[in-house]
């Protein structure tokens, strides 16, 4: 079956991460849409790598909605975010109310799409979005 979905790549990067949750105060977001020849970077507040990945996905989804792209495949190198975007809730010691809130936001945004998929890809296939997320680390902080 041939897919007509537009591929979108998102990535998040932490700024100043030292291994302890809560020490990161900023994250860089990267977005790349090859078919639209569109790439962008954005720096926002955040406290963890998973939060950076979720914020990048949410920003990517909102950008696609604004651009009228309704049949989209979001490609990410974060298996955790892909699993949650596909509706899998973390349980037990992995449950996290902050990540649950991001998951709920992603699921809520899916209603704006005719067709949407979330796909895990190797980091090597996400180099351009990664490049943008790292560029964002040099920007002024957006609220």
Image (tube, grey):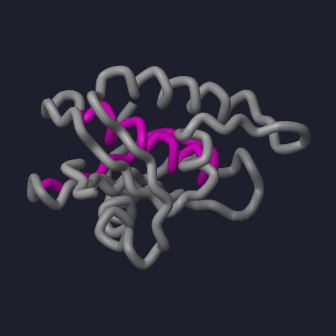
Q: Residue at x 14, y 54 (%)?
A: 38
Identify which residue, 114 or 64, lies in the foreground.
Answer: 114
- In reply to whether residue 73 is colored magenta, the answer given is no
Q: Which residue is drawn at 24% across and 48% down?
A: 5
Direction from residue 97 to residue 117 in the image, left or right: left
Q: Position of residue 105 (x, y in %)?
A: 50, 25
**Among the 4 quarters of the image, the one containing residue 119:** bottom left
- What are the residue bounds of the magenta stretch? 38-64
Picture quarter with the N terminus: bottom left
**Among the 4 quarters of the image, the one containing residue 100:** top right
Identify which residue, 142 or 95, lies in the foreground.
Answer: 95
Q: Position of residue 6 (x, y in %)?
A: 21, 50
Picture quarter with the C terminus: top left
Q: Residue at x 49, y 27 (%)?
A: 107
Q: Position of residue 81 (x, y in %)?
A: 57, 47
Q: In this view, does 47 lie above or below 49?
A: above
Identify which residue, 95 or 47, lies in the foreground.
Answer: 95
Residue 32 seen in render: no
């Amino acid at each position: 079956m041939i897919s007509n979905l537009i591929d979108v790549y998102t990535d998040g990067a932490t700024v100043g991460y030292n291994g302890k949750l809560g020490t990161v105060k900023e994250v860089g977001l990267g977005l790349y849409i090859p078919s639209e020849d569109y790439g962008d970077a954005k720096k926002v507040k955040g406290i963890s790598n998973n939060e950076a990945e979720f914020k990048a996905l949410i920003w990517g989804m909102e950008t696609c909605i604004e651009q009228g792209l309704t049949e989209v495949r979001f490609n990410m190198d974060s298996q955790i975010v892909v699993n949650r975007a596909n509706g899998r809730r973390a349980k037990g010691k992995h449950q996290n109310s902050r990540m649950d809130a991001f998951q709920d936001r992603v699921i809520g945004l899916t209603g704006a799409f005719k067709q949407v998929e979330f796909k895990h890809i190797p980091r090597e296939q996400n180099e351009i979005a990664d490049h943008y997320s790292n560029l964002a680390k040099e920007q002024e902080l957006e609220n």
